[in-house]
Image (spheres, coloured by chain):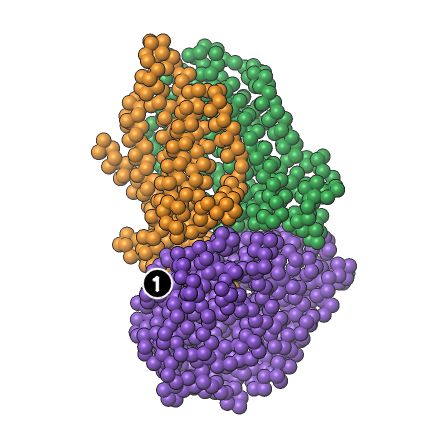
Chain colours: A purple, B orange, C green
Amino acid sequence: MHKSRLAAASIIAATALVASACGSSTSGSNSDASVKKLTIADAAEAPTYINPLNDNGATGLGVAQALFAPLVRTNPATGKVQNVIAQSVTPNSDSTVWTIKIKPGLQFDDGEPLTAQDYVASWNMTSQEARGWTNSGFFAKIKGWDKMNPLLPEGKKAPSNLPKKLSGLKVIDKTTFQATLSVPFSQFGLTLQYLGAAPMSAKERKDPDAYKLKPIGMGLYKVKGGVWKVGTDLDLVKSPTYKGPFAPQADEVVFKFIPNAETAYNDFLAGDVDFTGVPSTKMGSYQQDAPGQYVTSQTGDFLWYLIPPLWDKDYQSADVRKALSMAINRTTLSKLVGTATPATEYVQRGVDGFREGTCGTACNYDPAGAKSLLQQAGGFKGGPLKIYYSTDSATSQTYAQAIGNMFRQNLDIKVTYVGKTSSEINDLASDHKVDGVRIGGWGFDYPSIEDDLTPILACQADYNPEGYCNKKVDALLAEGNSQSDSQKAIGIYQQAEDLAMKDLPNIPLYETKSIYLYSKRIKPLNSKYTGISALYSTFTS
Amino acid sequence: MLGYILRRIAAAIPIGLIVTFGVFALVFLMPGDPIRALAGDKPFPPTVMAAKRAQFHLDDPFFVQYLLMMRDTFTGHFGTTFAGADIGEQLKLRIPVTLRLALLSYFFEWLCGLLFGIYAGFRRNGIVDRLLLLATLLILAIPSLVSTFTAQYVFGVKLKWLPVSGILDGFPTSYLLPAMVIGVLGFAGLGRLTRTSVVETVNADFVKTARSKGLSEGRILWRHILPNALLPVITYLGLDLAGMFAGAIITESIFNLPGLGQFLFQSIQMKEGGVVVILTTLAFVSFIVINLLVDVLYGVVDPRVRA
Amino acid sequence: MTQIAVAAEEVEIADLAEGRAPTTRELLISLLRKPAFDVCAVLLLLFFAMAAVPQIFTSVDPTVCDLGKSMHPASAGHPFGYDVQGCDYFSNVIYGARPSVLVSVVASFGMFLLAGVLGLLAGYFPGFVDALISRTADVLFALPGMVALIVILNAVPHRNIWIILGVILMIGWPGGMRLMRSTVFSVRNKEYVQAARAIGVPAWRILTRHVFPNAMAPLLAMTTLGVGGMVGLEAALTFLGVGLPPGTISWGSQFGIAASYREAPHLFVWPSIFISVMTISFMIIGDSIRDVLDPKLLK
């Protein structure tokens, strides 16, 4: 369980979030037409603090995207990695030692220079066990992280004399630092676009709590007036100290946090916001509600799986899992979900190395074939098949029922449903207590085929509580990680995908795209590599 | 009277303790791990989980957690939510929101409910009475989710008369639509109850006796009918007020009002036992106070009931 | 119809003050003379029949679904169109009557009995009994009902209709109890009760014969008003994610799902109409019974 990874939200989701969070206030009080103001309605609770190092939620990272700049980014036009804050990111021959040089002359909002020391100190801080900061796991591959975060038996408290620094981090000079990894990892450079690795200013490092609502960023925008008042919209203005590349057009960005997605949607229709997401329940009506003012992402944001409990003997036969897969009509299911496309592979569309239909015939809709395959495998034993759904999503139950109806009618088996909160389902899943199938989604943290495979398929991976483990797949993934030629690495990862597909540990269902509504004043950036971004909207008026 | 009030308050303290303990236990018994929920779909490393658990005493036994929570609550050290928000600050922001919503909606409800109810009760089977019955019948028969969503869609999205959601337009603009929805829904119940009560009192013996004694209609109305007819109504109003926190959950969620109801719902979902206890204590205290007032009012209105 | 019969038997009407006691038969006759009552009684009978034997209303199996027809509008043989899952909506609405009728009737009637009896005891026996009941009610009151519902229903491993009913009853009675208690307060000092007490009538007899019939009207009104709310409550629970599990066909869950898919208004309209008609019928019947039962209105 040592492989820990980037924390929760995918970069893509975070980008979209900024995109989704964008709306321009046409009815707002600001009547000055020369100020390009972008109002983003984010259908989420307002963040309670701004600290990208301790935040993996789409909301917090979406805000961080405006306030902080990453070391590198994926070029929305070409899909290639390019430097933002970094001057260069250079690995050694086996991808274990990475030298990162940042551009000279950059500053924090408070005027202090941005140095290599800021990165090293911030990453050390985040990795300290006692802080419990969310993105600690991002640095797990750096040497020394294991010593700072020892795995302890249940109920035992961590000793207080743990090391405070990552032994693998070294400041070379004012703008250069070096990260030594404990395992080869060819994708490390690419992961540096994650904002969870943003630097924290020296002032803030002394007392992070004091700055939780007045962050000192080093990005494109800063908080208007310096302090964000809880309960108000988050108002950002351009930061005069930002000297890096890729500044967006908007002069002012306002984040409105609206916990109810339908409310945010209605706010958009009433003209109060310029940019918002489309809730899953509005998939059938948004085109009439906002004709010509919606944008659909070109890549899939999330890949959704039906996850069988592999530890349960009823699901251990690959044929049973294939029979279930063949009983699912992915076309009608995707239509029900809205903007979704059927998924028959383990890699998200748009990612370098994506091949369609790697699942083969096991993902073709074939009720008769499914039924006979299930009979060959000895039928489905163990009483009715249980489908778990999450009670905190409006549509989870509907999708579960759609799949259940297909199983019931195509395989002639009894189906029952179990509704629980998603945190409880995740809890039960890791204890091997979900005695039925459940639906789960994955979106990469950084656009790499590696990040679509490892978290789901590697033995002991974080998103693999069912415990799928094929040593050959693991070996291929490790081989890909140490291959420094990225095209060769992709070939090896693809072999891993093909091998895992023969076992079909998870049943791919569909890939969802996100849809956003935008006002007539803006045109959001829509890249087939990085998704939709409201922050990088162009202003049309 | 003062002794009576003090006795009631003293009696309320053990109840309050039972309630806080019960609520905390219920939330504790709810399945799911709040720290895992905080992480979303992608899990935290185990060390991060352990550190966050220790921060919120979640690794302590139940009774230790309860006692620590009670100590913090009563010493005013509310601390932060699991997600990091300052609870005291949240309360300061949210209490006025719920209060404004409640006061405005009760204004609508009481005004319409009492006026129409009393009038219709007197002119039983008259045109106002029949209209009232029909209107309240419709209001009560249409599920409140339908009416709430419909009102938001028609007046907010389509006609744009009132803000769709949020409180950015301030008081009273932002609160008008949700308050009217709550008020109208409550009016139906109150109006009918008032009417029934008035009808019954009008037909009661003592009213007939009074009338046969030749007392003036005005005197009968103010001295005999209203005081008696309003007894059940006062109980109803007390119940109604006491329920304003919980009732706000759905309305505040649909209209995105950052009040206590929303806070409560989120806290339950996040298994924030401490926050749920604080909010329940608030609800409890206001409930006790309102009930005391109702009982005192009883004494004033009905001289035969003197506790 | 069962409710009416039970209610009518339950309440022996004998009014010392008025000096006459109508029989159940008399009551029924006077009820049947009201045309509004007749119409609503027929409607309710229809709903109850739907709940008991839905097969006689539709021959279509509500569980045969084709996702390809998701939310399709009405067509020949499918007067209400299809639901989100592509199942015939007419048969689903018909089959949905059972849990909804059960919830509304059992919860309302149970609540009436529970609240009525406890309110009667609390109002008539001040002191220990009143204190016990009222303080328990205080505790339950202080637990905001919706909160208790959400927490408890999230905690039970497998929700079903009886668990939901049980929780509704367990936390719902204090409201009616207080109303009943306050009416009993005003009735117990009435001349006819005092007279009965003076001539040594036993307490339970005074309670059942005199106090309960004379004090129940507001509670009955409140209960009949609440019947529809019970069906609505089932829908609200679905909205909050703690309603009946899928696989159970009910108006509440149909409505809860339809609230999310507003582009297909037929999903929203049909269960709403059925819920509303049933509620209105209950209320009109409740009003009629109250008018007939209420000894003070007998002249």
**Mark 1 secondary-structure assignment:** loop
Where residue A432 sits in the image (x, y, percent)? 56, 63
Q: Amino acid at mark 1?
A: Trp
Image height check: is C192 above or below A169? above
Q: Is residue A363 visible?
A: yes
Q: Can residue A324 be seen from the camera position used here?
A: no
> Does B200 appear above or below A146?
above
Q: Residue at x 41, y 31 (%)?
A: B113
The one of B50 and B238 positioned closer to us in this rendering: B238
Q: Residue at x 32, y 43 (%)?
A: B285
Which residue does the image show at 28% across and 22% down from the upper left?
B303
Which chain letter goes with mark 1? A
Residue closest to the eye, B127 or B16? B127
The residue at 57%/35% (across/down) is C276
Q: Position of residue B110 (x, y in %)?
A: 38, 33
Q: Position of residue C186 (x, y in %)?
A: 36, 22
How would you rate the neighbour count of disc 1 (Cα within 10 Å): few for under 14, some for 14-19, many for 20 or more?
some
Furthest-bottom residue in this view: A93
Q: Position of residue A452 (x, y in %)?
A: 58, 72
**B57 left or right of A315 in image:** left
Residue that label 1 marks: A228
Judging depth in this view, the residue of A471 and A136 nearest the camera is A136
Q: Residue furthest left?
A: B2
Location of residue B65 (image quadrant): bottom left
* Total residue callouts: 1
